């Protein structure tokens, strides 16, 4: 679970920092516009890295954790055991 948390937090942090950097030099009102820009940058960053990670797995490090999280279907495993 830790890899998925890290890979969620890192894009949010990067998006916030890039959103702040985008605001520098621009006369954007604080509040809703800044939040929308931050969300857009965060989403774009995450999507870009995830897409690139399919071809270049080492890009995963830009999400804070190089390996993709693996999820286990516990219900399926329990059904097999029964």
Image (tube, rainbow, N blue to C red):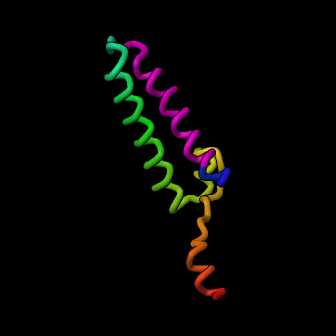
- Front residue of 59/42: it is 42
Q: Is residue 30 left or right of residue 12?
A: left
Q: Is residue 37 above or below residue 73?
A: above
Please identify the quadrant where the N terminus is shown.
Answer: bottom right
Residue 42 sits in which quadrant? Answer: top left
Q: Is residue 43 left or right of residue 67?
A: left
Q: Position of residue 16 (x, y in %)?
A: 49, 28
Q: Position of residue 34 (x, y in %)?
A: 37, 22
The residue drawn where x is 66% and y is 86% is: 81
Q: Is residue 53 above or below residue 35?
A: below
Count of picture labels: 0
Q: Which residues are magenta?
A: 5-26
Please identify the quadrant where the C terminus is shown.
Answer: bottom right
Q: Does the magenta run of residues contain 65?
A: no
Q: Is residue 77 left or right of residue 49?
A: right
Q: Position of residue 44 (x, y in %)?
A: 41, 42
Q: Does the magenta run of residues contain 16?
A: yes
Q: Is residue 52 above or below residue 41?
A: below
- Front residue of 27/71: it is 71
């Amino acid at each position: 679970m830790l890899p998925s948390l890290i890979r969620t937090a890192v894009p949010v942090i990067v998006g916030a920092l890039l959103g702040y950097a985008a605001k520098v030099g621009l006369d954007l009102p604080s509040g809703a516009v800044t939040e929308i820009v931050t969300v857009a940058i965060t989403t774009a960053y995450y999507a870009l890295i995830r897409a690139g990670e399919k071809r270049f797995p080492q890009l995963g490090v830009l999400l804070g954790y190089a390996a993709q999280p693996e999820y286990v279907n516990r219900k399926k495993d329990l059904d097999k055991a029964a």
